[in-house]
Amino acid sequence: MPQYLIAFNDEWVGEHTLEELRAKSTAALQVVDEMKKAGVFVFSDGGIGAETALFNVSARDGKPVFSDGPFVETKEHLGGFCVIKVDDDAAARDWAGRLAVALDWPQEVHRFPGREEILQLNEGE
């Protein structure tokens, strides 16, 4: 069964008061509870953005090099995400739509390639 990432970019979301964010969080958690009851929920988290970045890491001469900056210049930051495991794209679309309505901001959906897909890609080289 494929896994899907449902995510939103915090740049897609306008300014909100703390009360508005709490209300949206409550609504989104209700959808997550529905996901859990349906047995499709894998993992989720949110409230992340540019201000929550701790460090970056790159590879140099086969070793990790850690730095507290500079970070990649980008307008986009992952604001939150949910990973679900469902039968197909249509089911992922349904859950993403529920989150989009609960939060009233856009969601983006990615299907993780399964192990079989990755092996097929590697064999095609």
Image: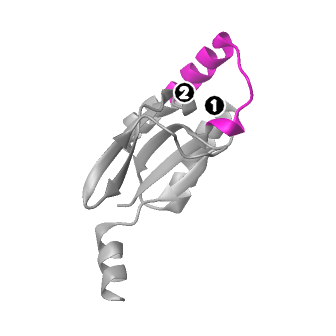
User: Residue reaching furthest bottom?
Assistant: 124
Q: Nearer the viewer, residue 91 or 78?
A: 78
Residue pictured at 59% horizontal, 15% vertical: 22
| Residue picked out by circle 1 | 102
Question: Could you give the CA–CA distance between mark 1 and mark 2, rounded to whole angstroms?
Answer: 24 Å
Amino acid marked by disc 2: Glu
Q: Residue at x 50, y 26 (%)?
A: 29
Mark 2 is surrounded, within 10 Å at the Cα level, by few (under 14), some (14 to 19) or many (20 or more) other residues, namely few
Task: Locate residue 66, reporting x and y percent.
Answer: 34, 42
Q: Are marks 1 and 2 in contact (CB under 8 Å)?
A: no
- The residue that disc 2 covers is 51
Q: Please, is residue 42 above or below residue 58 in the view?
A: above
Give the residue furthest to the right. 14
Q: Residue furthest top?
A: 19
Residue 123 higher or lower than 94, as above or below: below
In this picture, which residue range is highlighted in magenta?
A: 10-30
Q: As drawn, is 115 to the left or to the right of 110?
A: left
Residue beneath the point at 64% across and 12% down: 18
Q: Position of residue 76 (x, y in %)?
A: 63, 44
Residue 88 belongs to the span the image colors magenta: no
> Majority secondary structure of the magenta segment?
helix
In this view, the residue in front, 97 or 38, is: 97
Residue 83 drawn at (x, y percent): 42, 45
The quadrant in which residue 25 appears is top right
